[in-house]
Amino acid sequence: MSTLELPDYRQQSPEVAARFKRLHERPVVLEARALGKVFDGANGQVEALRDINFTVHRREIITVIGQSGCGKSTLVRILAGLEQQSSGQLLLDGKPVTGPGPDRGMVFQGYTLFPWLTVKQNVMFGLRMKGESSHSAQRDAKMWVDIVGLTPFLDHYPHQLSGGMKQRVAIARALANQPRVLLMDEPFGALDAQTRCAMQTYLLQIWKNVDVTIIFITHDLDEAILLADRVLVLEARPGRIAEVIEVSVPRPRSSDQMLSPEFLATRRRLDELIHPKSDQPIERPHVFRMTLVGDDVE
Amino acid sequence: MSTPWLAVRRPLPARRALPLKAVAFLVPIVAWCVVSYVPFVWHPQRLITDSGGSTNYSTDQRLEKAAYETEQSELIKAGQPPMRATAVNPIFLPAPHQVGEALYKAFTEPPARKGTPWLHERIGHSVSLLLKAFALACLFAVPLGLICGTFDFFSKLIEPFIDFMRYLPAPAFGALMIAIFSLQDAPKIAVIFIGLFFNMLLVTANTTRTLDPALLEAAQTLGASRKRLVSSVVIPGVLPLLYTDLRIALGFGWVYLTIAETIGEMSGITEFINQQGKFRNYPNVFTGIIVLGVLGFITDQFLGWLGGVLFPWHSRRKAGWIRTFVRRLTSERSNSGFEVSPPHAVVAKPEVNRVDA
């Protein structure tokens, strides 16, 4: 069996290298300094995160990837302010973060639209919390619903929408607050493959046209590469950064690039990091022979 | 192609469901008619129409079939003229037409005893008692329950004692309430209030705790302050569930009403039923019971329909309400200290996804 000859995943074309150079010159929006998190569990303390350091530049998309239980969700919850870190510092535009706030919008894995509000009212929620008048909140909400392409559903209730549509409304609701950072915790995890692919395209389109910085948690390697400028790979127990990968796939991205050498090289590297070879060999269960049909299935 | 009548957990189409619902009412009514009008079904007693030569029994007396036959054979042996009688049901089971007649007369003819209220006046009195007590209980129990369900501080401060109080049966407070509020309506309202208040508070608190915490987190990331979390998320989020809880509580209110009306000076429909029972006027007793049943049923059906109108986003998840209520009443209250819930435990609900249009 032979595998493809792939370039080094770190190798960047001049255009991509220039892009990254420009990216690093942009101001830092979010900075994590030596973040750590320890939970007090029934069986003593559990260290969920250790020494997490990274910076996010303006209008960058960072994806965070890692095995389940590596602390991805804990990290994003700390970034959102829903969880308090045990040690370290989190800076937003240079100022320490102390709790949840409208400057960090969040799209959750589960559906968290308010079921008693229509699509329009859901998107208006954050604006109303800010004290915007009903009239201007409505106008803004209509614009954001239009951006996610759901204008015909303005007055529908969430239970009348499909899963993908619900997440689009959730994105519009978070963006309407014009947050500095949009945190997304496996937002497409519950969607079927087709819808998920469409949603990724949607997200890239929105990101291209809206001034927003995105931190995107996922466990899907392809999704992580397709969306990201940089991929933050977490190791489990305790959760810590294994590597930060600059994705060398040129923008604009589309799912056609999934077979390009840069993409495959990055994917292979992620595979190595997430599923280390040294793990126990895959078990081959003993199965009795239970068929009389020929052996041509292999 | 049609689904079978007995499919596991499949709702029947309306054209099949409606006749079944009609049958649900028809079966007991038909059974009642059969027992009342078919002479050889049950009819265990004999009503004497002509006592003949009997010295033991007189006309219009009811006696058991066996006693009647013994007496009859003895009369024949002694050569006396025999008795004549018709087979009847016991006096406590009047025939449908008798009850219908009584029901009609109760509203059209003045009450037998001068100065006693008409039936509709009694109904008005009973309903106003119930509504006053229910409104008072809601007024106090719902805000307290919401506070307990929202803030663990108040839950720990208030609920343990309420939990104890709810095991004290409301009727036991009757004598005490009369001592405090003297006669008339006040002690009755107090007893219904006691019956409703404690359970209502605990149910409200438990219902409030069923709100998906992810909604609160989402609201926080959208900039909701603590005050707005309560007013814009907790309250609208639990309102439809709370509405159902209160609807069920009102149903229980009828039970407490009939007890409360026997306290001190008897009054209302309960007095009517008890009085007529003493006079052995059972068609009227049935009238009272049916009026209570119809009132309760119609109110509940109306409130159910109103709930669908008020909370359109909620109408599609209908659970069996008794099951829901019992679960709410008994469900574990908040995870207390010893159990640490992992932060990533907010799991997506297993919901079937439709492909985008």
Image (tube, coloured by chain):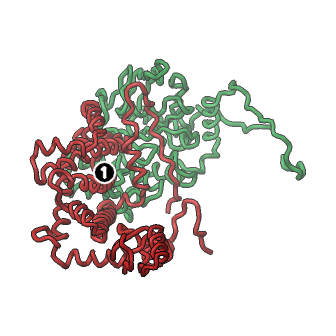
As drawn, is A78 to the left or to the right of B133?
right
Nearest the eye: A120 or B89: B89
B46 to A107, vertically: above or below = below
- Residue drawn 35% across and 69% down? B91
As drawn, is A65 to the left or to the right of B333?
right
State the residue lying farthest toward the front: B78
As drawn, is A273 to the left or to the right of A210?
right
Q: Where does residue B261 sit, x and y in percent of width and height?
A: 20, 55
Q: Which chain is represented by red in the image?
A: B
Nearest the eye: A179 or B151: B151
Quick one: label 1, few (<14), some, or many (20+) residues within 10 Å? many
As drawn, is A106 to the left or to the right of B142?
right
Q: Where does residue A34 sit, x and y in percent of width and height?
A: 41, 20
- Residue drawn 17% across and 56% down? B266
Q: Where does residue A113 sit, x and y in percent of width and height?
A: 38, 50
Q: Where does residue A75 sit, x and y in percent of width and height?
A: 44, 30
Tell me the quarter of the picture where residue A153 sits: bottom left
Label 1 sits on residue: B242
B17 to B154, vertically: above or below = below
Nearest the eye: B78 or A196: B78
Q: Looking at the picture, which amino acid does disc 1 mark?
A: Leu
Q: Which chain is represented by green in the image?
A: A
Q: Helix, strand, or loop for circle 1?
A: helix
Can residue A263 be seen here? The reply is yes
Nearest the eye: B64 or B17: B64
- Residue drawn 81% across and 39% down? A287
